[in-house]
Image: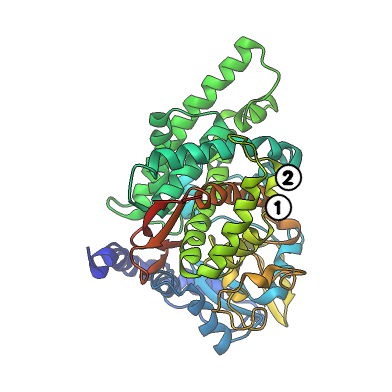
C-alpha cells in the first residue's frame, strides 16, 4: 500500500468534516470570540479551518516523521513562549520551552486540570464513566499507583521481568536469523503488563487482549468520527471488546477473593478490588496503565536497539557495562535491584534515545480559570498542550540537537524541565521507575544474548502518535559469542 492509499481514510474524514463545517461555523466563531464580550489578548497563532483547525497539519508533520516541525514553524512565526492553534476541534494553547513545561506541570488544579480528547475517552473508557471529570479520574488513577510503584515493590518485579525477558528472547528471537524489533518489543511489554497487572500468563488470553488493544490505541489521536471504516470506529469497537473481556476477568478475580477470603493482593487488579473500587472503575484504570506502560516502553526499546546499531562505540560501551553485570552473577541467577543500579551508562543511552525519539508527544490540560502566561490570556475552557518537541530538539537546551550524544545525561544532566519524556515536577509520570526497570532488564538480556545489524539503515519513521519504524525495524541477529 503506498502513502496515498494509506492516507485515503483521512481524506474521507476531511470531506465529511467539510460537509458538517457549515453547521458548526457560526457557533464556532461565537464561542471563540468569547460570546461577544471584550476580546482578550490571546496568544498569537491561527485556528485554521472551522472544527478541523490545524489537526491536518499536525497529523501530516507527524506522519512525515517531523512532528517538531509543527512546533518550530509556529514558534518562529508567532512566539517562542506560547502559541494558539486548534486541534481535535478544540481551541488550544501550546506551551513552549522549559518555562512553559514548568508552568503547566506546577499549575495542576490551580490553573489547569487534566484533560483527555474525546477520541481517547470514547475509544477506551466505559460510556457510563465518560462524564467523570478528568481531574477526578487522574486523582484516582494516581492514588492507586504509588504503593504499586514504590522501589520496595518494584524490587520484587525485577526477577519476573528478567525471567520473562529470557523466555521471550528464547521463544521469539533465538529460532530465527531475522526479526522485527518493534512488534516483538510490543509483544514482550504487553505480556509483562498482563502478568504484573492482572496475573494473566496464558498466551491465548494475552492475545485476546493484545489484538483489540492495538486497534484501540491506533485511534487515540484520530478525528472522532464514528462511521464504519474509520480508524476511530475501529478503535471504539475494539475498546468495547477490551472492556467486556476486562470486566469478565475482574469479576472472576473478585469472586475468587470472596470465595477464598484472600487478604494479600497478587497483582494490581487485586489491590484495587480490595480497596473497594468497582469493576468499571478498575477496567478504566487498567486500560490507562496499559497505555502508559506498554506502548511507550516498547517504543523506547525499539529505538535503543536502532541507535545502538548506528553507533558502534556506544554499543561497545553499553555491552561492556552489561557484561560486567553478568560476570558478577551466578549462572542462572536473575537480575536484582542492585544490578539495575549499575547500568548507569545504559540509562544515559536510553535517555538520549528518548530525547531524539520520544515515546510520547506530550499531554493535554484544560484551563479551569482565566489566567495570564507570557503576557497572553488563556481563557477558561481552552485546552493547553505541552509537547516534548518544544525542548528536546531545541539548541537552547541541547546544543547540536540532532547529534546522538549520551554524555548529555552524565553528571548533572540537562536543565530542569527540558527533558520531559515522563513529564515533570508534581506531574511526573509515576510509572517512570517501572519503565526504567523494564527497559534496562530487556536491554541487558538482549545485549548479553545477541549481536545484530539493521537490514534497512534508511528505514523511515512515522509518528502515529509515537514514533514507529515503518518496516518494524528488521534486524539480522547472531548469538553473542562470549
Relative to residue 73, is residue 295 depicted above or below?
A: above
Whether residue 159 sits left or right of residue 152 in the image: it is left
Relative to residue 263, is residue 398 depicted above or below?
A: below
Residue at left 63%, top 33%? Answer: 268
Relative to residue 396, is residue 434 depicted above or below?
A: above
Q: Which mark is residue 104?
A: none
Marks 1 & 2, CB-CB < 8 Å contact: yes
Whether residue 270 sits left or right of residue 303 in the image: it is right
Q: Residues within 10 Å of mark 2 (few under 14, many from 20)?
A: few
Residue at left 49%, top 52%? Answer: 298
Relative to residue 170, is residue 62 depicted above or below?
A: below
What residue did someone put label 2 on?
338
What residue did someone put label 1 on?
342
Residue at left 50%, top 70%? Answer: 311
Whether residue 158 sits left or right of residue 67 in the image: it is right
Place of residue 469 in the rendered image (x, y in percent of width and height, measured from the top left) = 39, 62
Residue 128 visible in this rendered orientation of the protein: no
Q: Residues within 10 Å of mark 1 (few under 14, many from 20)?
A: some
Taking depth in this image into account, of 363 and 203 the one nearest to the observer is 203
> Which type of secondary structure does the marked residue at label 1 adopt?
loop
Residue 273 visible in this rendered orientation of the protein: yes
Place of residue 246 in the rendered image (x, y in percent of width and height, measured from the top left) = 48, 31
Taking depth in this image into account, of 186 and 262 the one nearest to the observer is 186
Amino acid at each position: 500500500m503506498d502513502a496515498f492509499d494509506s492516507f485515503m481514510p483521512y481524506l474521507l474524514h476531511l470531506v465529511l468534516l467539510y460537509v458538517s463545517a457549515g453547521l458548526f461555523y457560526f457557533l464556532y466563531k461565537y464561542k471563540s470570540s468569547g460570546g461577544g464580550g471584550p476580546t482578550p489578548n490571546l496568544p498569537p497563532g491561527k485556528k485554521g479551518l472551522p472544527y478541523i483547525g490545524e489537526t491536518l497539519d499536525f497529523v501530516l508533520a507527524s506522519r512525515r516523521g517531523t512532528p517538531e516541525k509543527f512546533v518550530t514553524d509556529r514558534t518562529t512565526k508567532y512566539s517562542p513562549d506560547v502559541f494558539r492553534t486548534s486541534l481535535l476541534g478544540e481551541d488550544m494553547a501550546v506551551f513552549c520551552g522549559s518555562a512553559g513545561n514548568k508552568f503547566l506541570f506546577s499549575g495542576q488544579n490551580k490553573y489547569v486540570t487534566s484533560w483527555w480528547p474525546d477520541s481517547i475517552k470514547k475509544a477506551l473508557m466505559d460510556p457510563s464513566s465518560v462524564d467523570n471529570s478528568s481531574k477526578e479520574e487522574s486523582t484516582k488513577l494516581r492514588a492507586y499507583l504509588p504503593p504499586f510503584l514504590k522501589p520496595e515493590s518494584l524490587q520484587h518485579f525485577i526477577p519476573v521481568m528478567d525471567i520473562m525477558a529470557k523466555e521471550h528472547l528464547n521463544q521469539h528471537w533465538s529460532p530465527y536469523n531475522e526479526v522485527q524489533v518493534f512488534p516483538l518489543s510490543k509483544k514482550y511489554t504487553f505480556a509483562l503488563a498482563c502478568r504484573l497487572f492482572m496475573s494473566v500468563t496464558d498466551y491465548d488470553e494475552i492475545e485476546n487482549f493484545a489484538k483489540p488493544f492495538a486497534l484501540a490505541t491506533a485511534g487515540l489521536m484520530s478525528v472522532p468520527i464514528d462511521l464504519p471504516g474509520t480508524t476511530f470506529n475501529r478503535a471504539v469497537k475494539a475498546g468495547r471488546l477490551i472492556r467486556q473481556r476486562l470486566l469478565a476477568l475482574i469479576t472472576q478475580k473478585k469472586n475468587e477473593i470472596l470465595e477464598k477470603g484472600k487478604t494479600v493482593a497478587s497483582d494490581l487488579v487485586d489491590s484495587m478490588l480490595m480497596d473497594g473500587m468497582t469493576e468499571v472503575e478498575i477496567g478504566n484504570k487498567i486500560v490507562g496503565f496499559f497505555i502508559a506502560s506498554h506502548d511507550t516502553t516498547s517504543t523506547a526499546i525499539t529505538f535503543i536497539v536502532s541507535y545502538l546499531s548506528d553507533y558502534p562505540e556506544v554499543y561497545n560501551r553499553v555491552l561492556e557495562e552489561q557484561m560486567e553485570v553478568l560476570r558478577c552473577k551466578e549462572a542462572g541467577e536473575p537480575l536484582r535491584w542492585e544490578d539495575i543500579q549499575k547500568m548507569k551508562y545504559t540509562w544515559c543511552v536510553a535517555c538520549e534515545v528518548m530525547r531524539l525519539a520520544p515515546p510520547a508527544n506530550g499531554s493535554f490540560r484544560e484551563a479551569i480559570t482565566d489566567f495570564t502566561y507570557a503576557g497572553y490570556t488563556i481563557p477558561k475552557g481552552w485546552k493547553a498542550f505541552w509537547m516534548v518537541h518544544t525542548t528536546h530538539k531545541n539548541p537552547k537546551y541541547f546544543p547540536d540537537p540532532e547529534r546522538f550524544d549520551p554524555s548529555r545525561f552524565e553528571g548533572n544532566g540537562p536543565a530542569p524541565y527540558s527533558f520531559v519524556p515522563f513529564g515533570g515536577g508534581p506531574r511526573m509520570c509515576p510509572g517512570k521507575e517501572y519503565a526504567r526497570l523494564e527497559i534496562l532488564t530487556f536491554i541487558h538480556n538482549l545485549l548479553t544474548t545477541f549481536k545484530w545489524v539493521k537490514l534497512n539503515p534508511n528505514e523511515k519513521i512515522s509518528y502515529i502518535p509515537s514514533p514507529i519504524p515503518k518496516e518494524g525495524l528488521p534486524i539480522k541477529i547472531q548469538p553473542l559469542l562470549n
